[in-house]
Amino acid sequence: MTTEHHTLRTELEALTTEAFRPELAGIDTLPTLDIARLMNGEDAGVAGAVALRLPQISAAIDAIAARMAQGGRLVYAGAGTAGRLGILDASECPPTFNTRPGQVVGVIAGGPAAMVTSVEGAEDSAELARTDLDALGIGAADTVVGVSASGRTPYAVGAVEHARALGALTVGLSCNAASALAAAAEHGIEVVVGPELLTGSTRLKAGTAQKLVLNMLSTITMIRLGKTYGNLMVDVRASNEKLRARSRRIVALATGASDDEIEAALTATDGEVKPAVLVILAGVDGPTAARLLEETGGHLRAALTATGG
């Protein structure tokens, strides 16, 4: 074994996410229901581990929202499962919050092909991370969130270090304490979920923890940016029949208006929910609603206040 391989093995053995659990060594001999119970019991602790990091998560969100309000982008960077989760979260922002193309984006070690297949060696390259971020033209208004269960993945750490050098806001999301990733970032978030059911299979509890945190980062940032009204998705993009029906329901919930009023308002605003709510609650026409929202940076509540609504 080379010195390099021995060092890496020693490093992995020291990580909580890689720890071996002797008590589970006979798991493959258990009835399926028992394995499912064990796995479910493991998963039950994930939300509690996230709860311990809510102050750090909230501080990161406020910093992200401040940059995005100035036109910055939110970029997730990771390898393997972590990279896929970032791309998943980014891809769901346009239909949910009507974000601009490229406003929330995920980059994964090895590029798009790595979404469905393992790209050998890509996660070990900090240089690759720098190239991927440079292709996006990362600058001071942007935020880069490095995601890595181990907290040592060179691609994620390299992304954060490079982004920070460029003046971007940086967040490091890891599932091990005292990680290189959190240390490299301005905002370190370490959700320690403990050893996995299958030794080192960090797509399990660690992946679930990352999904929960990424959900928070994007969702609460969008709430702060006025992309919602109360708990309603008023910026939802009505791109199919289900979403058109949802748009009508959101307008109904926000206004209590009749079906006819809702249809008329949506027609006046080209199917856009936010101005339609304003048309009904403030008694303005479509163009006025659009102008008021432009003046308030898209904040429906602020636009309503401006009209005395």
Image: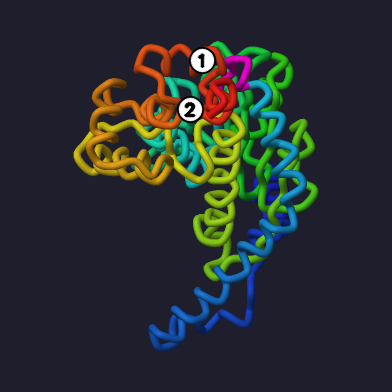
Label 1–label 2 contact, CB within 8 A: yes
| Left or right relative to 82: residue 1 | right
Where is residue 25 drawn, in percent x and y? 56, 80
Q: Which SS class for mark 1?
A: helix
In the foreground, 168 or 132:
168
Badge 1: few (under 14), some or many (20 or more) residues near its Cα, within 10 Å? few
Q: Which quadrant would residue 2 be assigned to in this image?
A: top right
Residue type at numbered disc 2:
Val
Residue type at numbered disc 1:
Leu
Residue wearing tag 1: 136
Instruction: Tell me which colouring the rendered structure shows.
Output: rainbow
Whether residue 280 can be seen here: yes
User: Magenta part of the protein: which range?
Assistant: 68-73
In the foreground, 122 or 75:
75
Q: Is residue 69 magenta?
A: yes
Whether residue 11 can be seen here: no
Residue wearing tag 2: 105
Where is residue 154 drawn, in percent x and y? 63, 34
Picture layout, residue 263 above or below residue 4: above
Q: Which SS class for mark 2?
A: strand
Q: What predominant SS class does the magenta segment belong to?
A: loop
